[in-house]
Image (cartoon, grey):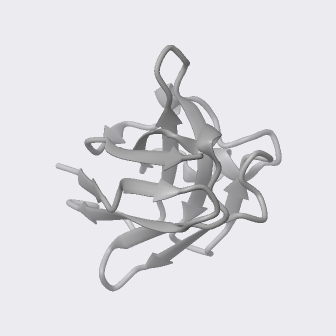
């Protein structure tokens, strides 16, 4: 059973930085995608960034490109989301999610897909950016 554990959220001032971690376990394949989603109050869950384990391919939403960086440590089975120059509009609950079925579909240039494309989810971690 695939399990994901997200952590690293907190309260930070605008312009500050945070690093989120997503520890994965139970993967039985070497090629999978791990994505970060976020959901602000009253809004839909949206994709932020995604990384593929086999070749390190990444994708970023335009709202975070240049500010956020996604990395992975395949030995530790951990994916990190390095968030810099944080803005109040980045405030949300952040979730990590995994796709072991069709990982390549998240890197076609059409976006990282919808939450329904990811079969495994971690619990959320709250990120609050004060102005």
The outermost residue toward the top is 42
Q: Between 32 and 50, which is closer to the camera in this rendering?
A: 50
Q: Is residue 112 left or right of residue 129?
A: right
Q: Is residue 60 left or right of residue 129?
A: right
**How many numbered markers are drawn?**
0
Q: Position of residue 87 (x, y in %)?
A: 65, 49
Residue shown at 48%/75% (left/top)? 72
The outermost residue toward the bottom is 75
The outermost residue toward the front is 131
Q: Is residue 80 left or right of residue 60?
A: left
Task: Indicate whether 20 appears above or below 109.
Answer: below
Q: Quadrant of residue 71?
A: bottom right
Q: Is residue 69 left or right of residue 65?
A: left
> Would residue 96 be visible to someone looking at this image?
no
Q: Position of residue 84 (x, y in %)?
A: 62, 67
Q: Position of residue 35 (x, y in %)?
A: 51, 51
> Would residue 63 be visible to someone looking at this image?
yes
Q: Quadrant of residue 9?
A: bottom left
Residue shown at 80%/47% (left/top)? 62
Residue shown at 39%/53% (left/top)? 11
Q: Position of residue 74 (x, y in %)?
A: 40, 80
Q: Between 62 and 97, which is closer to the camera in this rendering?
A: 62
Q: Between 59 and 125, which is closer to the camera in this rendering?
A: 125
Q: Between 60 and 120, which is closer to the camera in this rendering?
A: 60
């Amino acid at each position: 059973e695939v399990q994901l554990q997200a952590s690293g959220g907190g309260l930070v001032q605008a312009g500050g930085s945070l690093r989120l971690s997503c520890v994965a376990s139970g993967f039985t394949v070497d090629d999978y995608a791990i994505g970060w989603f976020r959901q602000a109050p009253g809004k839909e869950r949206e994709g932020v960034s995604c990384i593929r384990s086999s070749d390190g391919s990444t994708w970023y939403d335009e709202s975070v490109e240049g500010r956020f960086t996604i990395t992975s440590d395949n030995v530790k089975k951990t994916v990190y989301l390095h968030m810099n120059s944080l803005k109040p509009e980045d405030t949300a609950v952040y979730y990590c999610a995994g796709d072991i079925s069709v990982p390549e579909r998240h890197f076609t240039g059409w976006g990282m897909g919808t939450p329904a494309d990811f079969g495994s989810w971690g619990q959320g971690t709250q990120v609050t950016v004060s102005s």
